[in-house]
Amino acid sequence: MSTALAVLFDGVVYSSWLFLMAAGLTLIYGVMKILNIAHGSLYALGGYTAATIAGAWLAAGHAAVGSYAMLLVAALLVGAVMGPLLERGLLKWMYGKDEVVLLLITYAAFLILEDAIKLVWGVESKLLPEPYSLPGNFRIGTLAYPVYNLVLIAVAVVVGLALAWALYRTRQGKLLLAVIHDREMSAAMGINVDRVYLATFTVGAMLAALGGALTAPMISVSPGIGVEVIVLSFAVVVVGGLGSLGGAAIGALMVGIVRSLAVRYWPEAELFTIYFVMALVLIARPKGLFSPPEARKI
Amino acid sequence: MSRDRTAAALAVTCALLLAAAAIAPQWLVFLLALALAKGLVVLGLVLLMRTGLVSFGQGLYFGLGAYASALLANRAGLADAALMIVAGTVCAAAVAAVLGLLLARYREIFFAMLSLAFSMILYGALVKSSALGSTDGFNLHAKAFAGVALAAGVERRVFFAVSVLALLVVAWLLHRYLSSHWGRLSAAIRDNELRVEYLGASVYRVVYVNYVVAGALAGMGGAFAALAVGHVDPETAYWTTSGEFVFIAILGGTGNVLAPFLSAAIFEGLRTVANQYAPNVWQMSLGVAMLAIIMFLPGGLWTLLRRRAA
């Protein structure tokens, strides 16, 4: 019984982390039809910035609780700088090209950012263990878990609810849904599509950076952390259906729990299972679990 | 219509490369051998791209080809390069023939993502299999070609010469294929596959055949790469390797069967220079080059050559 609970808890923690990454990715795809490979670099940037800012905060002798705020500041900062920079500086000039070409363009941006990170922060790894160890542990049965895991789950739930509320309950969100539904018609009705794109991409970038910032205390931040994350979050959004927020949540839960089952009962297959789930879902539902039907145009 | 000069260009290129195999210094032979191996993979990718499909998972077949040939040498004790190349190609083609049944139904981003997923499954399996050396992979040493024992130091040159001959045959066949009925159907599918269906051709069958051919070529490239490097590791199936192939394909363009080899040679050459002088900005320069190509030369470097010729 307690094993089952532990497996489930591990799965949910991992799912929360996956969801933070996948939510931004699926939002950007839903609105802009861009599958953003550079999302992984934004995650890495979030991690590095958090390690730097929160590290400086702690080194200056401020209260350790404030380092959590610094993680958030790092995420907002990265999103607010990199979002507009990428969207206005690069993607804006590429709209109208094929989805696959746009994929390649973000791949190019990913390659550039990977080296830019190395140039700024060097190749040594950065550590920021305090926010992780500070709140201590709690117990499930006989197993001890860091309280930080609960923080991760809470953040994911709050982000999910906030996004859903913003999308379906606010005026701005409804404008966004209109743009998703029909970009040209929305523009004709007077919606500033340009601005919607910019806002979407910036929010997506902030979510990626938030994922990185929250991960920074758990790992050693080193070059290449974005490379693996990007294919993982791809798997999640493709399972859920590209562009669907609820799909990203379900996809994250499926992938997270399957992974923790694999880690517990068949550790050799850990990586294997994640992509196996993705392949299975795509075989059964070629466009993911929650994707709207599309008309074929001749 | 301009005269087809591909045959002549192919013959001249191969003659030059064979001469290089005999007299070029060891490092250049190594570089060219790797470029040719990757060029073979990219040739398959170009075939898919002409059908309108971009695979972000050719690393699957590259890795399969490399591991199949390496295992044959190491575990089965058949360290004969000819057998290894055949094994790598056949193994990749067989897997492509199965997966192709499924993948031929997917398009655009879903095709790219599903092929990525399959390559990552192989990567995940290889990384965790300690019998195959996990992340380190293992070394292999081929001692013979088609029953003829090879002296140490000469074998790399022989393998390279073999890959040049493979290039000659494969590129010529593919060139013929592209100008045949089916090859032209591929381009039509890229433009508008629904109309192709209405005209009575089977889109599925064309995509399937192209997919299997691309898989077989990637397997052959993997086997040649394993022979050239003398080592295999799971990195061959990782998505960044597949991304590299896509990059080389975009760099060269899909205009001609020689374009992938030209751009693979440029790519490997630049990488050698960058590793020497600026290892920290190598990826960055790749990214910038890719953006420049997409913006200013959508047909790849090959269009530059064409413009000069015309």
Image (cartoon, rainbow, N blue to C red):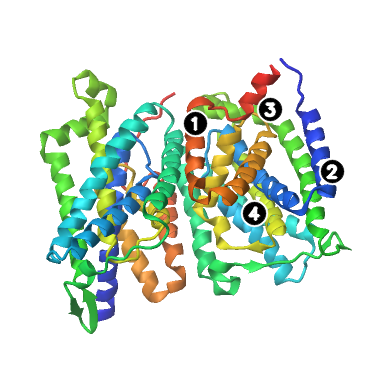
Judge depth for marks 1 and 3 and give the one in front.
1
- Mark 4 or 3: in front is 4
Which of the numbered marks, if any, corresponds to residue B152? none
Residue at figure coordinates x 71%, y 47% from the top left: B32
Q: Chain of mark 4?
A: B
Identify the mark at residue B292; answer none if there is no mark: 1
Instruction: Inspect this view and state whether residue A292 appears.
Output: no
Q: Residues within 10 Å of mark 2 (few under 14, many from 20)?
A: few
Disc 3 secondary structure class = helix
- The disc labelled 3 sits on which kind of residue? His
Residue at 17%, 61% in the rendered image: A67
Which amino acid lies under the numbered mark 2 shown in the image of this protein?
Ala
Q: Residue at x 15, y 54 (%)?
A: A158
Determine if residue B69 is in view: yes
| CB under 8 Å between discs 4 and 3 | no
Total number of numbered discs in the rendering: 4
Q: Which class describes the residues within 10 Å of circle 4: few (<14), some (14-19), or many (20+)?
A: many
Residue B240 left/right relative to A12:
right
Q: Which residue is mark 3?
A: B181
Q: What is the CA distance from the residue labelled 4 to the residue labelled 3?
A: 26 Å
How many angstroms separate mark 1 from mark 2 (CA)?
A: 34 Å
Query: Which of the 4 image quarters holds residue A92?
Result: top left
Disc on res. B92: 4
Alpha-carbon span between mark 1 and mark 3: 34 Å
Marks 4/3 same chain: yes
Residue B256 rendering spot, x and y as whole percentages: 67, 30
Do marks 4 and 1 share a chain?
Answer: yes
Residue B219 locus on image (x, y percent): 66, 52
